[in-house]
Image (cartoon, coloured by chain):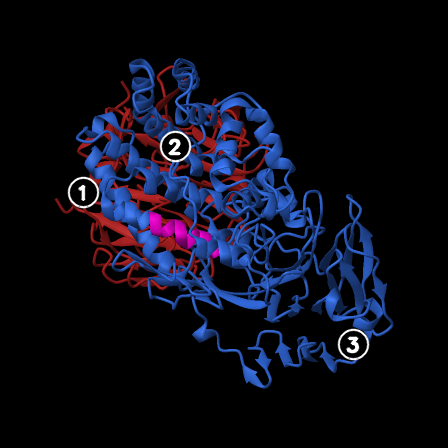
Amino acid sequence: MKRILLLLLTALPLAAQAPPFAARKMAMIDAYAHYPGPGDAGFGQIAARLFQHEDAAWCSRKLEQLLAAGPSGDVFWMYPVTAVAYLDQGQLTPSARKALRSAWKTYMPYRGDTENHFLLYYSSLYLMSQLYPNEPGSTWYTGKSSEENLEEARQWLEGWVKLTTTRGQGEYDSPHYMGVYLLPISNLAAWAKDPAMKKRATMMLDYLIADYAPENLDGLYVGAHARVYEDQLVEKWKGVSSDFGYLWFGVGRPMPFPNNYTLYYLVASGYQPPEVLKQIATDRSKPYTHYEKKRTRNRWRFNDDLHGPVYKTTYVRKEYAVSSDQGGILQPIQEHSWDVTWSVPDARGVQNTLFFSHPFSSVHELQTYFVFGPDSGIEGVVRSKKTYDSPDKILGGSPYEKIFQDEDTLMALYSIPPGTRFPQINGFFSKDTGPLTEDPSGWIFLRGGTSTYIACRPLQPYSWKPLADGGKRLFSPYLNNGVIVQVAAVSEFQNLEAFATAIKKLPLEVRLDPVPTVRFRSLRGRQLEFTYGQNPTINSRALDYTKWPLFGGPFLEADVDSERLVIKHGNLRRTLDFRNLTSTDSGH
Amino acid sequence: MKYGFLFLTALPLLAQSSLYVAAGAAKEYVVGAKLAASGLFRQTATREWEHLGYSIPFLFALDSDPADPSTLYLAAGNGLIRASNGGRDWTILTGSDITELRDLVVTPTTIYIAHSHGLRVSKDRGKTWTELSARLHRKYTEAIRVDRTKPEVLLAGGEEGVFRSEDSGQTWKPAGAGSYQIMRLEQSPHDPCFWLAATQGGGVYASHDCGKTFESPSEAPGVGKTLYDVAFDPTTPARMAVGGWGPGVTVSEDGGKTWQARNSGLPRSDVSALVFDPAIPGRIYASVHEEAIYVSDDVGRSWKPSGMEGRVANRMKFIPGVAK
């Protein structure tokens, strides 16, 4: 029966056919309890079985076995063990429980160097110190007492919530790393005893889910990301976001086997979002533009401010989405600054996206965000991020890329200094685009899926290079360069030729020197002007970045520094006030 | 008290010292990976390496308590760690607001730490901390040293060169190498007004006026490369060495006037740390990146491996009085 339920989950195609939230949740947990993923059964299986109050003797034996083998994994060890400690509820043997507790003395996890590492570290330390109060420093790897650990963790957690709700998240909008924000907050929402911490965490779950809801298309996390892996970049379905989109809202397809981030989210609070978030996540009846302000990761060097601003624009309609940040190096290594994503009935195995980038890697970039020495830095990164130092790569930001988006029109301009490694831009044209037309005008016209027309105008000559999986890479080796992208729904035109004709009629002026400048009347009738390194204008009015909201658009409202988020759809409204720790609903 | 840590140059004590190593991540490590023994090591009397305390991937520097050399202090990714009982019992002394420590100095009365976002001082052995980098333009600090003859004089190395303070860090003045990231600062044990600075790209810089100004010598080694360490030989006043990525081990035996590369026998010329043995003239240790620690008994003219295979030693230091 359980196997059948899991198979049903992965086979179901559409939101309308998805089982209820409770069934989705239990199937994902059950997958871990009975059908372990690749490799040996680990903490995930123990957590799932303890959650289901099943086979406690096996859980105890397995736990002792894992701990005896020697902990490893740093912060990625802390959260599973914390979950097991809380899911125990009297099921584990005294011996297993003792082994678990003593591991927090014998093993010192590295706290890590990113925001998600710190959140995992301090949420785990908080909960374990809470579980074992009044114990001296000699019983903890930190050498600090339970109360000292708890207080240190509390301070960091509260500080992170405040920073996020005033200046935006640092590792923002990641299809993968969203999981390692959700699971620790889910843990706190479930298990924190302090009512304020519990309330704060529960509100943060709404906040984090709200961050995703308007930027998903059929469950896929669209657009600019602080961090993404290359396989998720081209096949967007492969993100943890697909698990969560399916779990929360019944949209898209979950992973064949749930990510363990999803599991730990579920066995803690297993929080089901309110109806207002479901409406936001699934209502694509009208096009909309959504704005967000985020911040960079900690910049240790070469900058006067620890965090820089990130300005995001996301245009969404049922057929496609266009999303971007302003360009530049906003995050190291895994930044993805813009793309077009089109809707497909089933995104598994489909590369339903298009984007360009300047392949950039440098010691300067790494030393901005990391403390390690310059010489082995790139080599160290390439160990885990294989393409970081490749001229053929399509992932990563560049200091020489500037982006401007207005609705479904996007301009990416490049001015690459002479002598820069990899003096080229790469455009990703996936195996799943329709046949493309290279028009004598310089425009490239193509179809994305059955729903979307895309016009793409490289500013300099280019050639095509094949991609291993069947797509092709546009290669344009010029220092002053750029691309204009205009997207439209298939339903707006009789055919691709009609779309092309309409695009070619749009007034366009391009200058390449001394830096690229584009003047373009968009398909939506707006006069857009953008010069590399300058503020863009819309109908002659300069875009005012100083007024960029933390969240803005039809569904979310939050001002910078406000610690307040309004989530709204129709007459439904939820207001999160982090200063007063209140969550207020209306229209429900 | 003012000169309370003049003992640092007391050679009889150093003669009883042990070599400690702050070793970073082992070969092929990424965050979250299974970690081979890493962190703090001590070389035993039989020249074996004893691992002390926890395995941690990021340990950048170490120092000892002058009043109790069996208590070490460790600059680690997780913060400042007090490692008492000869380095075996650890307590993290800093909180969530400090991370990725780069360097430290422990004096009889104070602990200074350089970290990813500034400099701090504690006058109560790590219970409370005071910020010292408020007036530095850029906060990232890789190196911190105290003038052993003037405890109120500090030298700090960051991304904009060397800065010097004469009021215990309340105010700072640039002292040179302003175009370069400083990697290491050291004061000569023989001449307190002679300092060396290792830089990223600028080669070695020297000061002969007590750290007030640093200049690039005419034959500065390491220009265009990264120098990770500088060391003075406590047994021989005119002898010093720099270690770097590409230059490997480069030695001067005439007070820094001329320099010679001495890498014969090393598997590669990428050196992250080096130290002279204070008890055996001519002996020098060098950590070769992800290979091993190598030792030379002829000031670098020949080398042989000395253990710690696959690791990266970020700092090597002889600590007095805890050899047993």
As helix, strand or loop, the secondary structure at mark 2 comes to helix
Q: Nearer the viewer, residue A199 or A422?
A: A199
Pinpoint the chain carrying mark 1: B
**Residue A435 appears in which quarter of the rendering?**
bottom right
Question: What is the magenta range?
Answer: A202-211
Q: Which residue is mark 3?
A: A502
Q: Residues within 10 Å of mark 1 (few under 14, many from 20)?
A: few
Per the model, the C-alpha gap separating discs 2 and 1 is: 26 Å
* Residue A52: numbered disc: none
> Is residue A553 found left or right of A53 in the rendered image?
right
Please tell me whether residue A192 is drawn above or below residue A352 in the rendered image.
Answer: above
Q: Amino acid at mark 3?
A: Ala
Q: Residue at x 36, y 18 (%)?
A: B44
Please tell me whether residue B287 is drawn above or below residue B5 in the rendered image.
Answer: above
Q: Nearer the viewer, residue A64 or B304?
A: A64
* Residue B127: numbered disc: 1
Please tell me whether residue B172 is drawn above or below residue A144 in the rendered image.
Answer: below
Pinpoint the chain carrying mark 2: A
Q: Residues within 10 Å of mark 2 (few under 14, many from 20)?
A: many
Per the model, the C-alpha gap separating discs 3 and 2 is: 57 Å
